């Protein structure tokens, strides 16, 4: 790596802008980083003005993180290749449905020695009936090492500098320390673990559970029911990792990326909010996403569809009744109140994992 690491942030939505605030300030403060941080902005017009120009003059992303100043060394760039071509560290933070196109545009146009950090929660469907992790897509296109950062990280709260924790999954200790230096502040505390796949999968799957929590809120079923959905969701997350990604560790679910992110998203996230409105308004999820989120993107319903694509192909829908039911409600195959009926009949399947004996428990940690 270069003596002064150059950082590029690819994405500038709600979380992209909040992390740009942190990265910009750390890059300016620490000698080991080049102080100029490029941020790729998917260009759009706001009242006839380009968003990149607004960011570069007012130092505020007025659409996706209004009211918060970005450090002046964060430079908005409308061309992804231009933004990324000289970077040593590429921070990926776009809504997950846009990653394949972004990676294709970067292919062959970045430093071969660069490393990536993905903050993206979601999957993509894969040829052959399975799913790809977002980190795998980045790696396949760009042929660089990819670490991940996931945690209980509602972007607006972090932009407000409220104390929060996060988890970086990284296999290389030196790179892990560099990434920690880049991200950690006194109010945003970073743990680095080497269980990279489990960290990433926790981040993706908790968005499905949050959709279920929103349905429960919309049905006004109360705190006990919501806690039950969170617990069942956690069991399905553990079972999913144990079944499809063996070698991970149970302890990872106790990091910020696991149970903490599950809790915060089920109480404070966009997936919860829109799913509650789905029950009470009778509108479609797509309509509500447009009406309620001002251009921000929901990840839960599409993640539920991606997971269902794989479970259906493997004839395993019944082994993950919560994930399956949430997908069926999102797609109109079931109605929200069916969630409870399904849980009454099927939760034993979610719990069908012996934690004493599961693969996750056997793998040795540090
Ligand atoms: N917002 C949050 O509190 C958190 C979000 N995340 C994750 O971070 C990732 C990014 O989320 P946010 O930054 O919140 O984004 P967001 O939900 O605010 O999405 C808006 C962003 O998408 C961009 N966009 C729209 N159309 C596009 C296109 N065709 N191609 C490329 N970009 C396009 C917009 O320009 C804007 O930058 C997601 O995977 C999310 O799950 C993770 C932790 C917290
Ligand atoms: O991932 C998040 C918090 O860690 C944000 O969740 P939402 O996308 O549901 O707002």
Image (cartoon, rainbow, N blue to C red):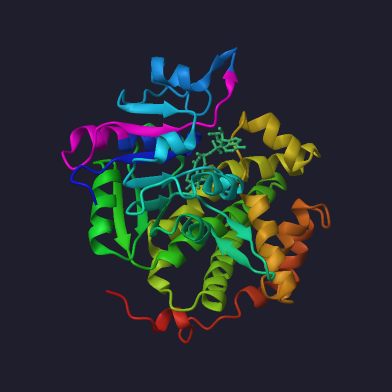
Quadrant position of ligand 1: top right
Please identify the quadrant where the C terminus is shown: bottom left
Left or right of 109 in this view: 32: left
Q: Is residue 221 visible?
A: no
Which residue lies at the image location 30% right of the left edge and 57% below the top edge? 191
Give residue 247's quadrant in the image.
bottom left
Percent x, y of residue 43:
55, 27
Outermost residue toward the top in this view: 48
Is 61 part of what is drawn in magenta? Answer: no
Identify the residue shown where x is 30% and y is 33%. Answer: 24
Q: On the image, which quarter does residue 258 sit in?
A: bottom left
Question: Percent position (x, y) of residue 70?
Answer: 36, 26
Given the current orientation, which residue lies at the most extreme right position? Answer: 333
- Horizontal side of 133 relative to 69 (left or right) equals right
Residue segment shown in magenta: 24-45
Residue 237 visible in the current orientation: yes
Percent across and percent down for residue 302 are: 67, 52
Q: Residue furthest front?
A: 108
x and y, in percent, of residue 244 in the image: 56, 75
* Front-lying residue, 92 or 209: 92
Q: Residue at x 34, y 40 (%)?
A: 86
Residue at 68% of width from left, 45% of height from top? 275
Q: Which residue is at the front of the view, 92 or 332? A: 92
* Above or below 7: residue 151: below
Q: Which of the 4 image quadrants contains residue 130? A: bottom right
Q: Is residue 229 above or below residue 251?
A: above
């Amino acid at each position: 790596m270069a003596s002064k690491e150059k950082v590029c942030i690819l994405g500038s939505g709600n979380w992209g802008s909040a992390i740009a605030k942190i990265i910009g300030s750390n890059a300016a403060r620490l000698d080991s980083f080049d102080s100029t941080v490029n941020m790729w902005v998917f260009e759009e017009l706001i009242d006839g003005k380009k968003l990149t120009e607004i960011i570069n003059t007012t130092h505020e992303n007025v659409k996706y993180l209004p009211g918060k100043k970005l450090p002046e060394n964060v430079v908005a760039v409308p061309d992804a290749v231009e933004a990324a071509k000289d970077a040593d560290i590429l921070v990926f933070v776009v809504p997950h449905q846009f990653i394949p196109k972004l990676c294709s545009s970067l292919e062959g146009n970045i430093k071969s020695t660069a490393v990536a950090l993905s903050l993206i929660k979601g999957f993509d469907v894969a040829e052959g009936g399975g799913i790809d992790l977002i980190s795998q897509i980045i790696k396949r296109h760009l042929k660089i090492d990819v670490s991940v950062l996931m945690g209980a990280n509602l972007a607006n709260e972090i932009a407000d500098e409220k104390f929060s924790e996060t988890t970086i999954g990284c296999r290389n200790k030196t790179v892990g320390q560099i990434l920690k230096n880049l991200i950690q502040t006194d109010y945003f505390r970073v743990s680095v673990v080497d269980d990279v796949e489990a960290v990433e999968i926790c981040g993706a799957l908790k968005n499905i559970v949050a959709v279920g929590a929103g349905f429960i809120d919309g049905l006004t079923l109360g705190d006990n029911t919501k806690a039950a959905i969170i617990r069942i969701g956690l069991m399905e997350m553990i079972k999913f990792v144990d079944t499809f990604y063996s070698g991970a560790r149970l302890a990872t679910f106790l990091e910020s990326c696991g149970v903490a992110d599950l809790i915060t998203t089920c109480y404070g996230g966009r997936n919860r909010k829109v799913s509650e409105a789905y029950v009470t308004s009778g509108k479609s999820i797509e309509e509500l996403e447009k009406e309620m989120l001002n251009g921000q993107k929901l990840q839960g319903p599409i993640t539920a569809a991606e997971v269902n694509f794989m479970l259906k192909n493997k004839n395993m829908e019944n082994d993950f009744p919560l994930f399956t039911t949430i997908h069926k409600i999102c797609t109109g195959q079931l109605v929200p109140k069916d969630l409870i009926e399904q849980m009454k009949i099927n939760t034993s399947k979610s719990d069908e994992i012996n934690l004493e004996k599961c693969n996750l428990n056997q793998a040795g940690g540090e």
